[in-house]
Amino acid sequence: MKYAISLVLGLLVGAVVFVLGLYLNPFSGQATVSPLAVTSERVIDLSFSAVPGDGILYTDHGETVVTPHPERIAELWEPAVHETSVYVTKVESSRGDFAGIGIKFSSESEQTAIVKGDAIANSAWHIYLPGQGTLLIDQTENFWSYIRGVVIPARTSAGDNWVGSFHAITTNGPGSLGTARVTGGSGLFDGMTSESVEALTARGYSANSGPVSIDGNLTIEFTELAAASE
Amino acid sequence: MMSRNGNLTKLGHSYRCFGGGVANWMKRLIKTFVIGVILGLLGTGALAWYVPAVDIHRERSLVSVQTNGGNIEVFHINLPRDRIMVGLPNVDNSIPAGLEWPGEEFLGDMQAELFKVRNSDDTVIGVASRLASATGESGPFIEWVVHLPARGTIYVKMEITPSADGFRNGEMLAGSRDFSVLSGSVREQFIADVGEDADAQGRIRLEAALVGQLGDEE
């Protein structure tokens, strides 16, 4: 009997050590500097509030800590879209002026592997910038450093919240440099293919209601083809 | 004297036996514990490696082969049931109620719609956005983004003028994951009469005709 207890205790300690190892793994961090920081092309910087309540619309399956809004919005409860969220937000230029509208579809990915530090989401932005045109940003994002640095500390804190400073590039593909793929649709972007990167800057998170103070940023490379058609 | 020495020898012997027993017992216990720790590490590692953290629900792809290659897949949207959002220049008419849509002041005549998308079995398999503008500063456009969580995303640019038959044709500009190697066209049609479906007052039909890229000939 004593050996069985010892074995079970050992199993538990082993499991806890493994989970702590994953959580504290220093090799699973996300980049904080954009791969497009050194591009020679022009870039478009768009910022937005990543707090769902600050956006125009947010919906998911309705069972998360984040409340869909507006109040009577349809929820995505059907099995095929259960792991999907839709977020509609105004996007602003780097000067803080209204720049356009962004619709973000985001679905949890089967590529998620916590053992590798990957909490992957497949996401797509459909963006309209008045006077400039429309484009699609297609990307995979890794939220592991956000979960590790913001969400878990908020859930384990006595006050059920996290306040601090966190910044990370969430985009990790499909481009070889960890960039998103951009396809232009109309206006200045017609025919354009380029790259993009999305980043999150968090200052506050509540375990009960989700993001409290989080800004998102999209850096979009504006390639020669589009510039030539101006 | 002899008897006293004999008792002491016996005492020492039993102490050694007892102490040695405790040491062996502790050693075996620690050994079991260490084996448990190693098994715990390996077991949790194997669990984390082999058990998927995310398991996306999949519906069957209902495709039909088209003449001269490729395949056709039909999606549809039941109106108004599958409508998630309509952002209109006149904010008061936007859906759902309480939507703080920027409206004409910021977006001109641009109209944005969000829908749930169904397959031929009438099962929801994804979500889609449709952006349209007739007189935008950057020119008129009608676009669809169809996001199917288990398969990928399609970006389609539609022709502005519909055909005489009531269709609007479009070209697939980009696709991700399952659609990344495909190209083709998408046809949009609004059907006002949906027959016996009492829940739907109308239907948007999207017919995607997609073909894979030709490989290099050896």
Image: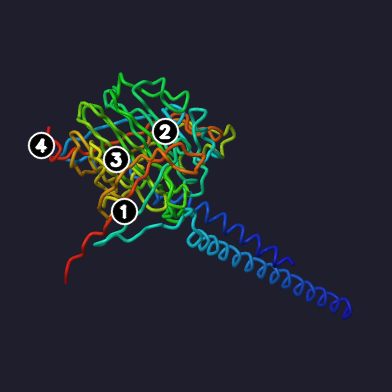
Query: Tag 1's secondary structure?
Result: helix
Are labels 1 and 2 assigned to the same chain? Answer: no
Q: Position of residue B175 (x, y in %)?
A: 29, 50
Q: Which mark is residue A228?
A: 4
Residues under labels 4 and 2: Cα distance? 37 Å
Query: Tag 4's secondary structure?
Result: helix
Q: Earlier in the sequence, mark 4 or mark 2?
A: 2
The answer to the question of whether label 1 and label 2 lie on touching residues, with beta carbons closer than 8 A, is: no
The crowd level at tag 3 (other Cα within 10 Å; few <14, some 14-19, many 20+) is: few
Which corner quadrant of the image does residue B63 belong to?
bottom left
Query: Tag 3's secondary structure?
Result: loop
Q: Is B18 positioned to the left or the right of B28 in the image?
A: right
The residue that label 2 is drawn on is: A202
Q: Kindly report which numbered mark, 1 or 4, lies closer to the viewer in this rendering.
A: 1
Q: Is A80 positioned to the left or the right of B66 in the image?
A: right
The residue that label 3 is drawn on is: B166
